[in-house]
């Protein structure tokens, strides 16, 4: 599957290859540190964000920093920011 932006396709292929190698050669052998692919993921993520802006696709969630290895993301949008406005349920 191609990326949302044509310019991002090569970065997506590089990230996919890195992830597949990490998963098969490290994760399945018990090594859960996924930081090896973080640099290419960050570059790919920025490319996707740029493509979304160019295509006028606005998703608040994309501004959250979804980096590999950052499982406690308390900066930026909080957990409650994704609730629909006017909702009184938690």
Image: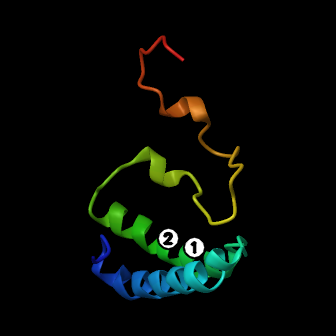
User: Which residue occupies the foreground of this view, 17 or 66?
Assistant: 17
- On screen, 45 above or below 16? above
Q: Is residue 14 left or right of residue 26?
A: left
Image quadrant where residue 57 sits:
bottom left
Q: Residue at x 47, y 47 (%)?
A: 61
Furthest-top residue in this view? 88
Q: Position of residue 1 (x, y in %)?
A: 27, 76
Q: Where is residue 13 in the image (x, y as percent from the top left)?
A: 40, 86
Image quadrant where residue 55 sits:
bottom left
Q: Residue at x 38, y 88 (%)?
A: 10
* Residue that carries the numbered disc 1 in the rendered image: 42
* Residue that carries the numbered disc 2 in the rendered image: 46
Q: Is residue 16 left or right of residue 43?
A: left
Cα separation, mark 2 vs mark 1, equals 6 Å
Q: What element carries label 1?
A: helix
Q: Residue at x 46, y 54 (%)?
A: 62
| Mark 2 and mark 1 residues within 8 Å of each other at the beta carbon | yes
Q: Position of residue 21 (x, y in %)?
A: 55, 87
Q: Position of residue 26 (x, y in %)?
A: 66, 81
Image quadrant where residue 68 sits:
bottom right
Quadrant where the C terminus lies?
top right
Q: Which residue is drawn at 41% across and 15% down?
A: 86
- On screen, 66 above or below 36? above
């Amino acid at each position: 599957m191609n990326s949302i932006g044509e310019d991002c396709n090569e970065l997506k292929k590089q990230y996919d290859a890195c992830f597949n190698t990490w998963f098969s050669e490290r994760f399945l052998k018990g090594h859960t540190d996924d930081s090896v692919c973080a640099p290419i993921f960050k570059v790919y993520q920025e490319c996707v964000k740029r493509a979304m802006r160019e295509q006028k696709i606005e998703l608040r969630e994309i501004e959250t920093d979804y980096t590999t290895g950052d499982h406690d993301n308390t900066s930026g949008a909080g957990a409650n920011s994704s609730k629909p406005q006017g909702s009184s349920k938690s």
